[in-house]
Image (tube, grey):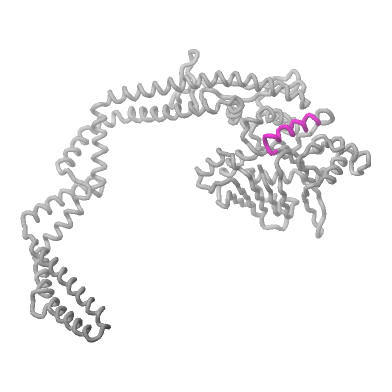
Amino acid sequence: MIKSLLIKNYALIDELQVEFDNGLVIITGETGVGKSIIVDALGLIIGARASADVVRAGAEKAIVEGIFHVADNKKLKALLADNDVECNDELIARREVSSRGQSRCFVNDSPVTNNLLKSIGELVVDLHGQHEHQSLLRVDTHIGMLDDFGGLDGMVSEYQEAFRLLQERQRHLDELIRQESELHAKREIRAFHIQEIDSVSPEAGEEDRLSRELTVLENAERLFSASSQLYEMLYEGDSSVHDQLVLARNQLQDLATIDKQFDDAAKEGSSALAIIGELAKFVQRYNSRIEFNPERLEELRSRLGQLVMLKKKFGGSIESVLAYRETIGQEASLDENFDEVIAGLKKETAECLNRCKTLAKRISVKRTETAQKIDKAIMAELVKLGIKNGRFRTAISQKRAAGGLSIAIRLDKEDVSLNQRGMDDVEFFISTNLGEDDKPLAKVASGGEVSRIMLALKTILAKSDRLPVLVFDEIDVGVSGRIAQTVGRSLKSLSSFHQVIAITHLPQIAGLANSHFAVVKHESNGRTATSIQKLNKEERIREVARLMSGEEVTRAGLTGAKELMGLS
């Protein structure tokens, strides 16, 4: 649900903030006060087009910010996670439009593209009326709605996993077939490179290890001379460090017998003597192990030379050489067993295709059964909403395979393409007048009739539709009397599953509100501004009475309003 909406410097609105409740939210107001401006602003934060024209005169930018509760919206959370946008139970969408026409979008304080904002909006809010953002008018949404209504999500998920594996196998197969001639063409050069690398048999980390050993052997004389001198200095020579420390330690110990303040110093002297002793032993051992080995020296230089040649030829590092060797080894193995590998992969691909075919046909049968139920229910609902001669049809079709990269199955002597949701395309068709052919829902006229059609669809699909917020603008155009009551009851029923926000001028609809807001236009400092206020019980009664009788609210009008609202 949408919890709050903040609008600044947008059209006639200076600054407006409204807190929404759950259930049926009604917005009323006189003609021309700017009721639809609020809905237009809401459209801005779900990806509608932005123009500098919306910025209030004299302002640098318009700002619209909405806070939504999205705890149970799994698709939305997955979309946010995929785009590295912070995700929690609350979503804050903000849009800023400058007076120069520049637009910036933010979701949970992260900058996002307008395309991403639009994708997010499609999972949160559905606007109906004079707006582009109408999910039911997009053909690509029809199949998902049909599947939701029929409870086919589990079957579709199973199919999609099978289809993913099929695509993976098919891509692998296509790639191998494409590589066949290339593998054969490179056979000789590949064999030569394998022999060249294997004759050296490089090992990971070998070069560093050999280089360190070479450095030691090349400096053997210097190491021997320096370590000999160091041992003499530390231990063997006249006035060696060791001998001088012995004298110093003894002196400190003597002083400590006189003054206890020298105790710690005497201990430090003993420690220093022990350290020098260990250091001298290490230097002596190192000196005794120094080798003068010209043969090993030449062997190291030769080996490192071989490694340098391999690096120059095959990638610049031993790791690159080894990676290349693994690649051409795999290619050689594939080349030798190509027919066997292709046959195995073709078998796996065929098994995946058969699995997809079985699942796709099963889903298609279920969709046909579900479509019949939807069609019957929606036509009954259209009658209630004043479209007496309405006909509704859910068209399920299959697309003939065009060849190329498409994945197809044989069905009734024809190749049919598979897609991410099976083998079906789904589109809703409707006719609202007697004698007219049904037409694609996406091509019906806009306005109140469209909104009533949407309402009929939403009423039937309510329990399965995942969109939490539905907004109806001008749903009551051309509606009055008994039909208005039916529209109101349908909206009220729909609000049990969704938060429903409806702009209306009909008291039969307004009287059913869970919460009621009135939009007013006023003048301030010589300028016109639009504002909105939530009505309390008495104010609601008066507003419904105004809708019934006009600006002059009578006692009879108030009584009638109470009766309509069930308060008498």
Location of residue 166 in the rendering, given as x and y in whole percent from the top left corner: 42, 27
Q: Nearer the viewer, residue 297 or 328?
A: 297
Q: Is residue 284 positioned above or below 68 on the image? A: below
Location of residue 28 in the rendering, given as x and y in whole percent from the top left corner: 80, 42
Give the residue furthest to the top: 413
Give the residue furthest to the right: 555
Q: Quadrant of the C terminus?
A: top right
Q: Residue at x 44, y 30 (%)?
A: 164
Q: Quadrant of the N terminus?
A: top right
Q: Quadrant of residue 226?
A: bottom left
Q: Is residue 411 positioned above or below 185 on the image? A: above
Q: Quadrant of residue 187?
A: top left
Lateral position of residue 538 relative to residue 22, left or right = right
Q: Residue at x 57, y 43 (%)?
A: 115
Q: Nearer the viewer, residue 70 or 337?
A: 70
Give the residue furthest to the bottom: 258
Secondary structure predominantly adopted by residues drawn in magenta: helix
Lateral position of residue 456 relative to residue 269, left or right = right
> Which stretch is magenta?
484-499
Q: How many marks?
A: 0
Location of residue 93 in the rendering, given as x and y in whole percent from the top left corner: 61, 48
Magenta-colored stretch includes residue 97: no
Q: Residue at x 65, y 50 (%)?
A: 65
Q: Nearer the viewer, residue 106 or 510?
A: 510
Q: Quadrant of residue 2?
A: top right
Location of residue 138 in the rendering, given as x and y in whole percent from the top left corner: 62, 32
Magenta-colored stretch includes residue 488: yes
